Amino acid sequence: MTGTFAFDESDATQGNLVGEIHSHPGGNTVPSVADWARVDAWSGWTGRNFRSYVIARDTSDPNSDFAIRVYDTTSDRDIDANGPEVNPEAAPCSS
């Protein structure tokens, strides 16, 4: 959950870009203002609902599991509203 990564967006097209996956090492499970700006920008560019997958865990519990939550342009943007958890295949765990 540390380090940096240089994105290679050279093969990204409006037809093949569907989402992003990133971590929040501080434990925040909801998107930041910058995360929402990317969701909106990429959704506008692709012409479809871009998804942001946030990986985080409860930092108050060092033994907690990491969870993957998904957000898109239809998600509640309340800072206390967790998006649905997804499984490792990026499908919603519940409806």
Image: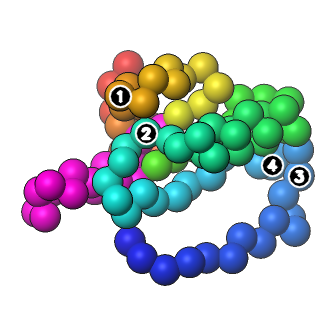
Q: Residues within 10 Å of mark 1 (few under 14, many from 20)?
A: few
Residue, disc 2 = 30
Q: Which residues are magenta?
A: 55-70
Figure quadrant of the N terminus: bottom left
Residue type (three-letter) at the residue carrying disc 4? Asn
Residue type (three-letter) at the residue carrying disc 2? Val
User: For residue 16, which numbered disc appears in the image?
Assistant: 4
Secondary structure found at label 2? loop
Closest to the camera, between mark 2 and mark 4, is: 2
Q: CA distance from mark 1 to mark 4?
A: 31 Å
Left or right of 47 on screen, residue 79: left
Secondary structure found at label 4? loop
Closest to the camera, between mark 3 and mark 1, is: 1
Residue 36 visible in the current orientation: yes
Q: CA distance from mark 4 to mark 3?
A: 5 Å
Residue at 38%, 26% in the rendered image: 81
Q: Residues within 10 Å of mark 2 (few under 14, many from 20)?
A: many
Residue at 63%, 46% in the rendered image: 34
Q: Nearer the viewer, residue 30 or 51?
A: 30
Residue at 73%, 34% in the rendered image: 40
Q: Are marks 2 and 1 in contact (CB under 8 Å)?
A: yes
Q: Residue 12 colored magenta?
A: no
Mainly helix, strand or loop, the magenta region? loop
Secondary structure found at label 1? loop
